[in-house]
Image (cartoon, grey):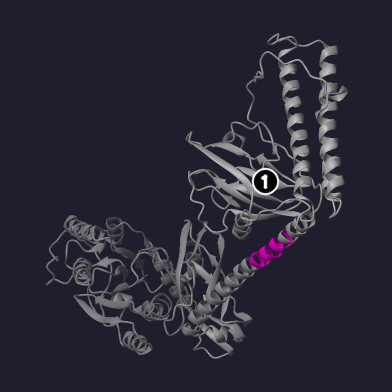
Amino acid sequence: MKKRFAIAMLVLLIFGTLPGVAQDRVDLIVLLDSSQSMIPYYNQVVDYVLSQTVREYMRFGDAFHLLSFSDSTQVEIAQVLKTEQDLKSVIARLYLLYPLGKNTDLVTALKNVYQYVADLPESSAKYIVLITDGMHSPAPRSPFAALDAAGVKAEIDRVASDIRAHGWTMRIVRVPFDTNGASTAAGTAGSGTGAAVSGPFSGKEAPSSSPGSGDYLSEVAAAVGTVVTTFDPQNSAATINDTIDLPVIDFPSDMGVKDYAFTIPVEIHNRSSRQISIELTRLLLEDGTDILTAKEFAEAAPGKSTRLILKVKLPGSIPAGATTLSLEPRFGDGLRVSPGISHVKVELKTSPLHVFFRSSFRIIMFIALLVIASAAVLLVVLYVRTLHRKTEEPIVDAMIDSAHSVQVSHSAHVSPYAKQAAEMVAVSAADEAREQAAILAAASGTGQHQRAQLVAPPTHRAAREDALATAQADAHAHERKAAELLQAAQPGESSSQEAKAAAVLGAWQKPGPSRRSLPLAASTQPVQSASVRATVAYEPRIQKPGAARLMLHVADQNPNIGRRNIHAIHAGGKKSIGGGSSDFLIFLLPVPRNIASVYFDGVNATLVPIRPEFFPDLDGPSEECIGKDFRVLTARGKELRIRLDLYEPPVDRINKLLHCLESPGMPGKS
């Protein structure tokens, strides 16, 4: 039993040292010495070929070829292993073999095996295993019987060169023919003297008269580029353990409870003296189904182990419950491992998701429904946001129109003359204040007595500042007084209110301490220095609650774009100006988005340049920007003119136009 185990391990040694190839099919050719000198170990050889070569190394799709040689060469088995029945047929044929040859013609056997392998399909990997005791003792009728040792070596080198030129792999196993278990063969190469003694079934070969008889196994190994593996029955275990390098794969015996998709941890032990690269490409079930979902790669150092995590998905045809999986790993480089097939226990459970996604149609339907649901949710969100904006605009418009209507109805009771006087007072006061401010600014820039570009003394500068402050205060006071008179006017009181307005207007026009004139500067153009275009900082504020509708006008830009450039803005809010997705859109020339922002404080609006390089005329925020023109300079040097105005609905403009036809009549007459 020990001898059979040792022989079985020896075949692993042979095939474990075979280099990896890319072909999937393997043609294994065993060239077996069937001379009488093989009788003592022939049964062990048959068991070795049977139990390991066929059962462990070979796999379905491979082809097994057995050629026996003694006086001549015979093809015993040529079988492609496709089914279990093919395997049983090969095993039955092996047990019918028996060594009966009286001579061993090694040169003829090598030439015949070369010719046989050359006729096999080129797409498969070819491994040749020579099992012999090493003697070359041809019969007298052999064409190589007359060759001496040098001639035999020349023929061996010639056929070995052809084998190596085709890239075939050859391994050699020496089987002792001495019944005492000696591990060396009788005779030496080129000696021409065979030590074997003839006799029926004696385990001895008949003496050969060939001058080239002898042991040429080492010459064959050197010619094909391999080594001779000698099997010593007395110390077989130690010999095998020192040389075997077939990787061993270790699957877990029991995976427990798993779904149909899970992972399998495996260990691969590299018992060779060389580093191996592992590329696991497939993991086959007994019926040939590949359950591996992703390739796995690893490197195994000499004498070390590596770990692979295999991601598998079992087919739905396997019923749920406890089952045993027969797993056959396939490697991309032709690597063979031991054992070739592993058995793993697992208890399968079916999850609802697995049941649902078992059908490809259901998967497609699920993806389609998911896409439709996502699109529907997106459309609902966009619709709600659009609806919110659309419902907000009428409310804001109604509030603004309501406030405007209250103001108009309140002022409708004021006499036209009173309104005219109040407006004259307000306009006159505002113009006078702006005039004084301009005079003071010019004076502060140029100095007194028309001295250009001279700095005024501190006393004069303080006097001018006091005068400017006083003038501005007077202007604001008169404006407030005129507004109070306008608001306080009621029907029947028009005469007194007109008199009061006239008095205020006269008082404003009379010279007084607060109306003293200031010296005019020689130059009213202030000297401007170059400044760096830095980011403008602005802190928004709220003077009173309210809202307004603003409209952006861009010179030469088509205004017929609906309400795209008309927006309501609340006190404390802001809107952006620019291209792209800006609130107020400039599309006449290309400009970036958000080059400026408009803030509303409840009374007036302020334009703040976010990108100052586009506003060459602004050094900071422009307050009371409604009705002002602003120059915008694009990145290519093109100029644009923009203006923000209070939006006046077309209905209001039509009403004003119609009211222009009305005549107020003479006061006090019906």
Residue 351 magenta-highlighted: no
Q: Main secondary structure of the magenta part?
A: helix
Q: Quadrant of the C terminus?
A: bottom right
Residue 394 magenta-highlighted: yes
Dividing the picture into quarters, in which one does residue 171 lie? bottom left
Q: Residue at x 40, y 77 (%)?
A: 48
Find residue 403 and report its horizontal and vertical position in percent: 76, 58
Q: Nearer the viewer, residue 145 or 305?
A: 305
Q: Nearer the viewer, residue 239 or 14?
A: 14
> Is residue 595 placed above or below 86 in the rendered structure?
above
Residue at the far front in the pictured view: 669
Q: Which residue is mark 1?
A: 598
* Count of marks, rendered view: 1
Q: Nearer the viewer, residue 263 or 422?
A: 422
Q: Residues within 10 Å of mark 1 (few under 14, many from 20)?
A: many
> Is residue 626 placed above or below 320 in the rendered structure?
above
Q: Nearer the viewer, residue 264 or 104?
A: 264
Is residue 616 rendered to the left or right of residue 29? right
Callout 1: SS: strand
Is residue 162 rendered to the left or right of residue 175? left
Find residue 330 and report its horizontal and vertical position in percent: 43, 72
Is residue 244 rendered to the left or right of residue 432? left
Residue 34 can be seen, yes or no: no
Q: What residue type is disc 1 on?
A: Val
Is residue 527 rendered to the left or right of residue 539? left
Q: Which residues are magenta?
A: 388-400
Q: Residue at x 23, y 58 (%)?
A: 165
Find residue 460 and report its horizontal and vertical position in percent: 83, 13
Dividing the picture into quarters, in which one does residue 94 lie? bottom left
Find residue 669 and report its horizontal and vertical position in percent: 76, 54
